[in-house]
Image: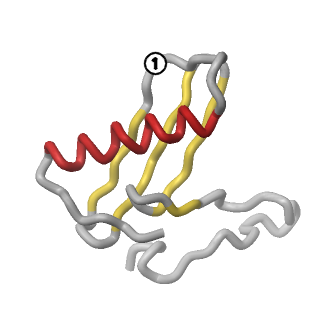
Amino acid sequence: MHPLKAGMTGSPICLTNESYGLGLGNSVVGIGHTGAHPGYVNLVAYNPLDDVSVMVVPPFIDYSKEMDDHLALLISIANEARWIAGYTATWTP
């Protein structure tokens, strides 16, 4: 069974480091994770309604913008890619 379908949560998975978690979040794209590092931002999400994952990794980051602006752009790109591929189910966070 897929771990997300089994009810996986963000509980600590490393017994020696209780502050380490899975870092999963909810968005309209699905359940996933975002990240940033100097030079790029990314979004990976899984939508259980249509059993599709999407990953967006633009090769840039605009340091003059807030991270929320980057996240909004990533979600917009992910939604557009899913729509173009024929997957239109909207995940409700």
Placement of 75 over or under 1, stated as above or below: above
Q: Name the residue nearer the viewer: 50 or 65.
A: 65
Q: Is residue 10 left or right of residue 69?
A: right
x and y percent of residue 71 in the render? 53, 40
Please give the count of numbered marks on the rendered protein.
1
Q: Is residue 20 left or right of residue 5?
A: right
Placement of 60 over or under 21, stated as above or below: above
* Quadrant assignment for the N terminus: bottom left
Q: In which image quadrant can residue 21 be found?
A: bottom right
Placement of 37 over or under 9, stated as above or below: above
Task: Point out the residue furthest to the bottom here.
Answer: 6
Residue denoted by label 1: 59
Residue at image position (41%, 59%) is 28
Q: In which image quadrant can residue 45 be found?
A: bottom left
x and y percent of residue 5 in the render? 42, 79
Q: Is residue 37 left or right of residue 58?
A: right
x and y percent of residue 85 in the render? 14, 46
Judged from the image, the secondary structure of the residue bearing numbered disc 1 is: loop
Disc 1 residue type? Pro
x and y percent of residue 34 in the render? 56, 44
Q: Name the residue nearer the viewer: 9 or 79.
A: 79
Q: Is residue 75 left or right of residue 69?
A: left
Residue at image position (66%, 19%) is 38
